[in-house]
Image (cartoon, rainbow, N blue to C red):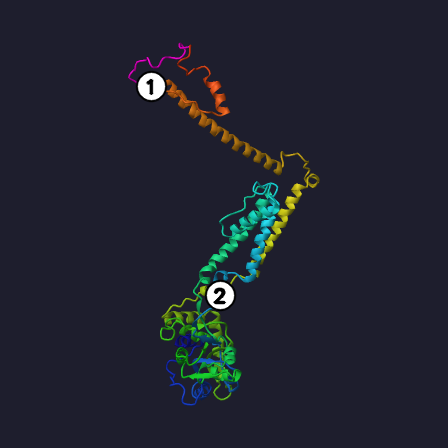
Amino acid sequence: IPLVMDELARRAGFRWRDSFIVTEGLVEGEDYTAYANYHLEHVDMIADWFTDTPQRRSLGLAFPYNWLDLSLIMVTWPQPTRGDFGNIFFSFMRPFDIWLWFILITFVLYSAVVFWYLEANVNGRYIGKGPLRGIEIATFYAASKLTWSGHFQPTSTQGRIFAISWAIVCICFFSSYTARLASSLSSGIVPTSRVATPEDAARLGVPVCVWAGTSQEQLMSQRYPDMPQYKSESEEGTYQDLKDGKCEATVAEVVPWSVAEVSQSINPDCSLKYEGRPFRSAGGGFVTRADYNSKCSGLLNTVVALHMSEMASEGFFKQLWEARVLIEREVVCDDSEEDNVEPVKLRTMGGLFISHLGISFICILLASLRGNTQLLERLFGIKPGQGGLSDSEQAKVYAEIARKTHKSAKRMKGLIREQKNLARRVRRAMSGGKVEPQETSSEARDINMVGFDRFSIDRSSSAGSHAPDLSSSKPSGKTPR
């Protein structure tokens, strides 16, 4: 307040530090309205926080400029409560609204049916399989895509477009779900309060702490006569009485609460919370008397209002109060609402579903046009047979090539095995060993006839000149190869 008075005096050209008094506060049985009326008989202006109310104006009090936000709010002390079994057991479903889960499951099935329709005749996974089996396979890949553990493998243009669209849907759901999953899997013990508004207190019949002698007490008595009140002697006393269990909530003002919230003496553990919105808008500031006759204090009211409005437009009061909060800050409370994240609603993701639905219709149209050669010839001048084989014909060719390749690989494996057996027999014959006849396949016998018909391994043959006598040869000192 002294900083505000200094700036106001500088702008208006008056002095105040040599002509002020400090009062001792209320006397017994007095409220702040009577306090203001009494002191304005002796001073020109009271530099304090007074709430601007119609009742006070009717008594001749004037408020030059309401530079403080004194809207009324409810401050509570939430107590830990455990949720019911259903909420805890199915906490993994909290990130999404129940209707969003229903639509998501529906679109998984829908996407599986559409993809099977687009790929049934061109994709090797679905060719030769019935509709039920094909849709079952497509459903598995559509559901796996939600967790990015599987994906469609399209072979057609329309299938690729549809797969990209479904991938966008899945990545949006995956990101939203994982971002909210940590807070959803909490223990279920969360701080809650029964009272968030004066109506709640009046309905439940629980007491609310108010600062005695202020406009809060008068307002609450007039508007909520059925609500029990516990009158505290000071503003700090209302918060202490709340913690002592004398009331369920306390009535506070926005600007004073911003200082009390970060005060070590009032809110050391950040357990006091303000939830909801102000239930009554109000402003306040300095107070004078609307006197335009005897003392002309009404002229002072006009001059102060002019300069304070200029100060407000220049951001003086905002900067001043932000600096005050930083100076008074003794505790740091986390204002994040991570533990109270609202589930994603259907209307939030509705546009994503509509877009995916539109793209699926386009893909179905492309698939229909691709199968209608007469329409393609009419629209694009493409005749049947142009451009090589169709997708279905290519798929059949590829399947036949794969089948024959597999058969040839098996045949080659048998040939290699027979080659090894034949080579083993030759080495034994050349080293003088007897070779036991081994049964060979027809392919191996063909190779034997072609590759070895010019070399006899029978040592008793009459053509001895053609078969060297290995037993009579002398060792040469070298290992025979």
- Residue 350 is situated, as x and y percent measured from the top left of the image, at 58, 58
Q: Nearer the viewer, mark 1 or mark 2?
A: 1
Picture layout, residue 30 above or below residue 262 = below
What residue sits 36% from the left and 75% below the top? Answer: 265
Quadrant where the C terminus lies? top left
Picture layout, residue 92 above or below residue 460 = below
Q: Nearer the viewer, residue 41 or 337?
A: 337
SS assignment at label 1: loop
What residue sits 56% from the left and 53% below the top? Answer: 108
Does label 1 or label 2 sit earlier along the sequence?
Answer: 2
Q: As drawn, which residue projects farthest toward the bottom?
A: 29
- Residue 275 is situated, as x and y percent measured from the top left of the image, at 47, 72
Q: Nearer the viewer, residue 237 or 19?
A: 237
Residue 99: in sight, yes or no?
A: yes
Mark 1 is on which residue type?
Pro
Q: Nearer the viewer, residue 174 or 409?
A: 409
Mark 2 is on which residue type?
Asn
Q: How many marks?
A: 2
Q: Badges 1 and 2: C-beta atoms under 8 Å apart?
A: no
Which segment did they paint magenta? Answer: 463-481
Q: Which residue is mark 2?
A: 87
SS assignment at label 2: helix
**Where residue 480 is drawn, which disc sits there?**
1
